[in-house]
Amino acid sequence: MKYERKNHCKHLLMYHIIFVCKYRRKVLSGIDSELKEVIKLISENSDFEILEMETDKDHIHLLVKSEPKISTLSIVRRLKQETTVGMWKEKGEYLSKFYRREKTLWSDGYFVSSIGNVSKEAAEYYIRNQG
């Protein structure tokens, strides 16, 4: 991958991010294509780019490319909040079977790792072969 140039800065920041469904409920197999569309829309209106994503039954892997001015926490918060709201709008009836008392989707925590020493292709291969 080529380095990005912006505002006197040359950078290449990519992160492997994993979100887990609340209570490890196996929700995503029924909404995976809609979830991916919502994530694509979010990234189109953001300062970060989703390079790769794949779901399993109870978690999602993302390969995210961003700028130095954006913290990983802000990326995670935005993705978790907006996917939860978007999925409840589109698939509320389905989600209510798993989460009766609260409009939730993701657990509180997340995993993030920079992929500085791993090639982009290796990270994409790993994410594609999940699930």
Image (cartoon, rainbow, N blue to C red):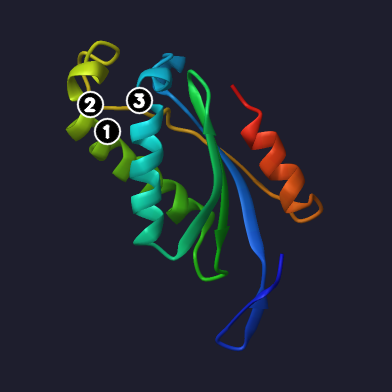
Q: Nearer the viewer, residue 36 or 116?
A: 36
What is the secondary structure assignment of the residue under circle 2?
A: helix
Task: Please name the amino acid that badge 1 sits on.
Answer: Met
Task: Give the quadrant of the N terminus.
Answer: bottom right
- Please tell me the numbered disc located at residue 17: none
Numbered badge on residue 87: 1
- Describe the element under mark 1 as helix, strand or loop: helix
Judge the density around disc 2: few (<14), some (14-19), many (≥20) Cα neighbours within 10 Å: some
Residue 40, image x and y in percent? 40, 49
Q: Specify the amino acid type for callout 2.
A: Lys
Residue at (37, 35) in percent of width and height? 35
Q: CA distance from mark 3 to mark 2?
A: 8 Å
Residue bearing mark 2: 91
Q: Residues within 10 Å of mark 3 (few under 14, many from 20)?
A: some
Q: Alpha-carbon distance for marks 2 and 1?
A: 5 Å
| Image vertical order of residue 70 relative to residue 6, above or below | above
Q: Are marks 2 and 1 in contact (CB under 8 Å)?
A: yes
| Residue for point 19% across, 24% down | 92
Q: Is any atom of residue 81 visible in this view?
A: no
- Apparent side of residue 50 relative to residue 40 in the rendered image (left or right): right
Identify residue type, mark 3.
Ile
Query: Looking at the image, do the residues carrying marks 3 and 2 touch, with CB atoms under 8 Å apart?
Result: yes
Label disc, if present, on residue 31 of the rendered structure: 3
Q: Using the rendered view, name the quadrant where residue 104 is placed.
A: top left
Report if the CB atoms under discs 3 and 1 are less than 8 Å apart.
yes
